[in-house]
Amino acid sequence: MSFLTRHLRAVKERSLADLDLPAHEFDTLHALAGRRGRAAPTELADDLRMAPASVTARVDALLRRGFVRRIPSTVDRRRVDVELTDAGHAGWRAAMDVMGHEEHRLLSVLTPAERRVLADLLRRVCLQAQRAADSAAGKTPGGDRTSLTG
C-alpha cells in the first residue's frame, strides 16, 4: 500500500508540475469541482479543513490566474461565492486526466469483476479505519464520513 501511495503521489506531483499547477491550487480547484464548480468560501474552508483566511488567500491566487471568479450568492445577498471558470475547470480536468490515466493503467491488470471486489474490500478497510479514527477523536458513529461513503 505504501509503495502504491508513493507511486500515485509522484504521478500527481509530476502532472501538477507539468501543468504549472501547485498542489494547493489543485486541491482548491478539486474542492470546487466536487461542489459542481461553485461554493461559498466557508464551504471550501470546511472541505479543505483550513482557516477561512487561508482559503481567501488561495482564492485570491486562483482569481489572479483566471481559474475562479467571485459571484454574488443566489441564497444570501450578503455573501459572495467562488465559481470555477472555464480555465480553472480545464486545469483541474487536465490534472485529473493524467492521474486517472495512471490509475486505469494500473488497474487494467484486473478484470472488471476483480476491480469490483478490490473496490469493495478497500471500502470496507477504509470504513474500519474511519471508525477507529472517529472513536479516537470522540466522534459518534454516523458522523461525517463523506470522503468514504461519497
Image: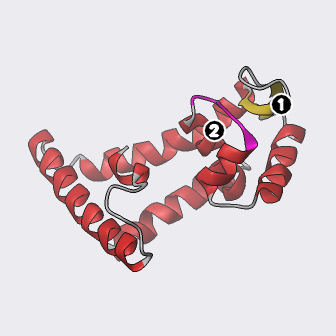
**Which mark is on residue 70?**
1
Q: Which image quarter: residue 135?
A: bottom left
Name the residue that disc number 2 marks.
Answer: 32
Residue 19 seen from this side = no
Residue 58 location, x and y as percent?
A: 80, 51
Q: Is residue 20 magenta?
A: no
Could you say which is closer to the camera, residue 89 or residue 106?
A: 89
Residue furthest toward the top? 74
Quadrant location of the N terminus in the rendered image: bottom left
How busy is the neighbourhood of tag 1: few (under 14 within 10 Å), some, or many (20 plus)?
Answer: some
Write the start and end of the magenta stretch as one range. 36-41
Residue 122 location, x and y as percent?
A: 23, 59
Residue 57 location, x and y as percent?
A: 85, 53
Side of 104 relative to 87 (left or right)? left
Q: Please, is residue 68 above or below residue 111 in the view?
A: above
Residue 74 seen from this side = yes
- Residue at the (85%, 48%) spot, across then down: 61
Q: Secondary structure at mark 1?
A: strand
- Residue at the (67%, 37%) spot, across then down: 91
Tell me which label, 1 or 2, sits earlier in the chain. 2
Q: CA distance from mark 1 to mark 2?
A: 12 Å
Q: Which image quarter: residue 32?
A: top right
- Residue at the (82%, 25%) spot, across then down: 71
Quadrant location of the C terminus in the rendered image: top left
- Give the number of callouts: 2
Could you say which is closer to the camera, residue 138 or residue 18?
A: 138
